[in-house]
Amino acid sequence: MILTGLARLGRDAEIRFTGQGEPVASLALAFNYGQKQQDGNRPAQWVDAALWGKRAEALAPYLKKGGLVSVTLSDPHIETYQTQGGERSKIVARVLDIELAGGGQRNEQQPRPAPTAQAQPPANYNDFDDDIPFVSLNWQIRRHLI
């Protein structure tokens, strides 16, 4: 089965390497579903996902908690495991495709770029540069512009 949708990252991506040196990024994905509850939030289904290969290593710095991603998951299934409190279960899957969709928290340590001064448009037609490539005005149109 294939699952595709928008999800929020529940924590920063954790990158590890297999014994053969292949990178694996662990992701906690929250998929919202249903109607808003009384507290104003929609319920979420959590999925533990793994992104493999060079793409995992390249994207890990950008996969931060709170970020919105579009993902395609392969073979989502339920795994059970034992804890001190008893048996638990979770949904796990492998990431086939992932795209950053925005919406993450800005890191306040990064300086914002300074606004650039924008060129002011010419006040009238005579102020335009005559060396505009690939443009020629018909004399009748030019007569109406002046």
Image: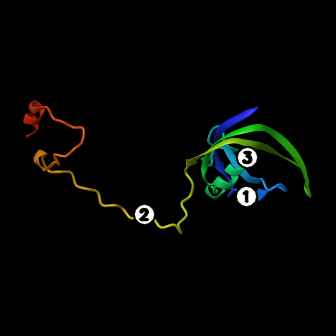
Image quarter where the C terminus lies is: top left
Which of the two residues, 84 or 18, is positioned nearer the viewer here?
A: 18
The residue carrying mark 3 is 46
Residue 87 visible in the snapshot? no
2 or 3: mark nearer the eye:
2
Q: CA distance from mark 1 to mark 3?
A: 16 Å
- Mark 1 and mark 3 lie on one chain; the one further toward the N terminus is 1
Disc sitting over residue 56 in the figure: none
Residue type pointed to by label 2: Pro
- Relative placement, left or right, of 128 versus 38 is left
Identify which residue is drawn at 68% across, 47% down: 30
Please tell me which residue is depicted at 72% across the width and 51% down the height of the picture.
Answer: 27
* Residue 71 spot, x, y in % from top left: 66, 41
Q: Identify the residue under disc 1.
A: 14
Which amino acid, mark 3? Trp
| Residue at 69% from the left image edge and 56% from the top image edge | 13
Q: Earlier in the sequence, mark 2 or mark 1?
A: 1
